[in-house]
Every structure is written in structure tokens, then in C-alpha cells.
Image: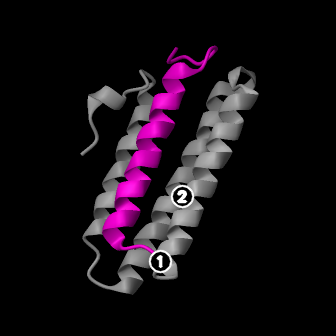
Amino acid sequence: MWHSLYSTRVKEFDHDHQQIDAMLGDVSSASTAAEEHRHLMQLYCAIISHIRFKNEFLGSKLSRGQKEHDGNFLRSVRENIRQRDRGQITRKELITRLRHLLMAHAAHHKQQDGSPAA
């Protein structure tokens, strides 16, 4: 489902975003609650790895605003997973929300001054 429209023009970031989006497909196709949970934990770990890589890759070029955005992105993902675990949202709602968060995260890369994608 990932589209070049969301490209940050940084191939490593785009690859991570594509992989994370593909993992959402794995969550979508899980046949049991345990399998869904396992895929969600893998997804969450992939997002953490992406953010760590981005911090290392950009180093001092990473703005305070981008760091805050990434922290908010991670918190939002975590909160949506918790809501799903508590049965407060459906799997479809979770995936829709996480895809929107991922698209907003990728779009934010393009807006940052000092980013290689700017």
C-alpha cells in the first residue's frame, strides 16, 4: 500500500517506511489474537529501530522539533496498540490509525529544514 508519494527522498528512510507499512499488512492478516500481538510487537520494535537509525543518520542535523515529532509518533503508536489490546478499537481501526500516523511521520521528514529530504 505504500506509495512513492510518501517518499522522503532518503532511501534508507523510505525503505524503513515501506517495511513498516508491510508489517501492518501482517497485522491485518493475523489469524489469532496471539499472532496479531506478535506482529504488533515486531512493528513497534521496527519503528523504534527506524527512529534510532534516523537519530544516528542525521545526528546534529536532527532538529528539536523532529525529535519531538518522533517521540509523539512513537507514543501515538504505543497508545493505539494499547487501545487494541484493551479491545477499545477494532483491528481495522488500529491499522487505519497506524497507517495515518506513518504517512504523517513520513510527510514530516519533508518539512524539516536541515534534513537531507528538504
Q: Position of residue 105 (x, y in %)?
A: 50, 38
Which one is nearer the viewer's eye here, 115 or 103?
103
Marks 1/2 in contact by CB < 8 Å: the verdict is no
Residue at 58% in and 63% down: 78
Queried whether the magenta region covers residue 99, the answer comes back as yes
Instruction: Name the amino acid, label 2.
Output: Val
Instruction: Name the amino acid, label 1.
Output: Gln
Q: Residue 66 carries which label?
A: none
Q: What stretch is highlighted in magenta?
A: 89-118
In the visual, does 31 lie left or right of 39?
left
Mark 1 → mark 2, Cα distance in angstroms:
14 Å
Q: Is residue 38 above or below residue 112?
A: below
Which one is nearer the viewer's eye here, 56 or 39?
39
Dominant SS in magenta: helix
Which of the two labelled residues, at mark 1 and mark 2, occupies the earlier sequence position?
2
Judge the density around disc 2: few (<14), some (14-19), many (≥20) Cα neighbours within 10 Å: many
Q: Name the residue under label 2.
A: 77
How many marks the image carries: the answer is 2
Q: Position of residue 35 (x, y in %)?
A: 37, 80
